[in-house]
Amino acid sequence: MAPQADDILQSSLPGLWKYPTYKKQPVKYAEIWMECKKIDDNTDGLWRVHDGFYDFTEWVYKHPGGSDWLSITKGSDITEAFEVHHVTKTAEYLLKQFFVRPATEPRNSPYTFMDDGFYHTLKRKAQPILAQLPPGPSAQSKLCSDLLLAAFLLLSTVANATYNFKLGVLAGFILNFLVVSAHNFFHMKDNFRMYYFDLSFLTSREWRISHALSHHLYTNSLLDLELTFFEPLLQWVPYRTKSLCVRYGSWLYSFALYFIFFYISIVSRLYLTVQGKLKPSLRKEDLIPFIPLFVMYAYSGATFINTFIMWCWIVLIASFFFSLNGFNAAHHHPENFHDGDAPRADCDWGICQVDAVKDRTEVNNSKFLVLVTFGDHCLHHLFPTIDHWHLHHLYPVFYETCKEFGITYKSGTVLDLLKGQFLQLAKNEPNRNPPGK
């Protein structure tokens, strides 16, 4: 049974005044999430930051991070994105020249960014450390991603030439690593490596919305599109109306969804394109997923039919490993906050991020695994534009700030997180005590 708006509290988070409009849509996808957020934010076609309206029209194509971030979000409240994507004070100084008028209504967001709060304190402590690091993606991350791309194309071609499905499994596993490493790059300013992500049938542009602007900024709240994307089949929110089939049957059929996740993405886009709901409907990046098919066919000597079958097999395997990794990376554990649970009185954005994350100890011990398995997840949420290879430098000030504010940073094993996601799927009673109690 699918949860309805009147089955649950509008949101357990104070400050999220409206039940998100996108959740009422029969098909949930990145563009509709953004369009519905604009309706809920009601900014008269401007950009809202905290309690002011701004006009960045002349700045869109001058924006150092690329035009997408501003062109996509025009007409919405970008407070969280502005705070989180700009670690230094430079953007704050520039902001004043674009001011139009003050806002008269409260933000439809539960989060705060007080100057003496957790997140601003952590940012101030992190600034001198980040100033000593090279800007942008690290040489190590770029090299790893490029080598993964070469290995994927080589293994795929050899698997196709020999029609060896075991090699195809290995190629799919490498594609999964490549796609996750590319996620590191689409959080940053425009760069060609972010398009490695598109080799999967997922698209970097859509994930800049569903992942960077939705999941990262409103983690485990009703505004998190990734939390609700698979509803009613997978229900991470502790709805009291969950049926036994959904609570426990999902332990089995979730694995089937993992295998076809990439295919769901391409089929959904084709359906939405035919319906005229994607604008623009076709982009040059839509050709990227077909590059491996062309390479495999051109250099293996195999027939096109065999090549197509092997390509589909490799994508199927990559989809499984990517989904298994992604859905068990950090967020879905009964110890983590999910909308519906009792919230803290302090809704500092950074604290809410820590409450929604549980890191994996084995992964965080390797910079390579951090890059290819969504590692150092809590720090990545707090500083998403910082290259994964550099995140470990921030642990000392992160631990110090957690201690200063009495915040508990949670970690567990890979097995603990894997078991935790099934326990969260079965959970239909919210946590009655706020995090830390």
Image (tube, rainbow, N blue to C red):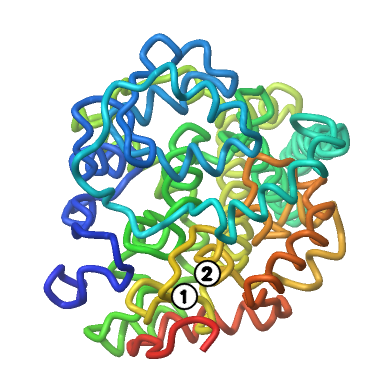
Residue 148: horizontal and vertical position, in percent? Answer: 80, 40
Tell me which corner region of the image, top left, top right, bottom left or bottom right, holds residue 5. Answer: bottom left
The quadrant of the rendering that contains the N terminus is bottom left
Residue 300, compared with residue 404, is above or below; it is above
Tell me which corner region of the image, top left, top right, bottom left or bottom right, holds residue 433. Answer: bottom left
At a point 76% along the width and 43% down the height, the residue shown is 159
- Does residue 104 appear left or right of residue 364 in this picture? left
Crowding at mark 1 (Cα within 10 Å: few <14, some 14-19, many 20+) = many
Question: Is residue 109 visible to us here?
Answer: yes
Q: Which mark is residue 356?
A: 2
User: What's under tag 2, amino acid-wise?
Assistant: Ala
- Does residue 421 appear left or right of residue 372 in this picture? left
Q: Nearer the viewer, residue 72 or 154?
A: 72
Spatial separation of the CA atoms under disc 2 and disc 1: 5 Å
Residue 370, compared with residue 420, is above or below; it is above
Tell me which corner region of the image, top left, top right, bottom left or bottom right, holds residue 346. Answer: bottom left
At a point 63% along the width and 60% down the height, the residue shown is 321
Q: Which mark is residue 337?
A: 1
Crowding at mark 2 (Cα within 10 Å: few <14, some 14-19, many 20+) = many
User: What's under tag 1, amino acid-wise?
Assistant: Phe
Badge 2 element: loop
Q: Are marks 2 and 1 in contact (CB under 8 Å)?
A: yes
Q: Nearer the viewer, residue 410 or 334?
A: 410
- Does residue 370 appear left or right of residue 284 in this picture? right
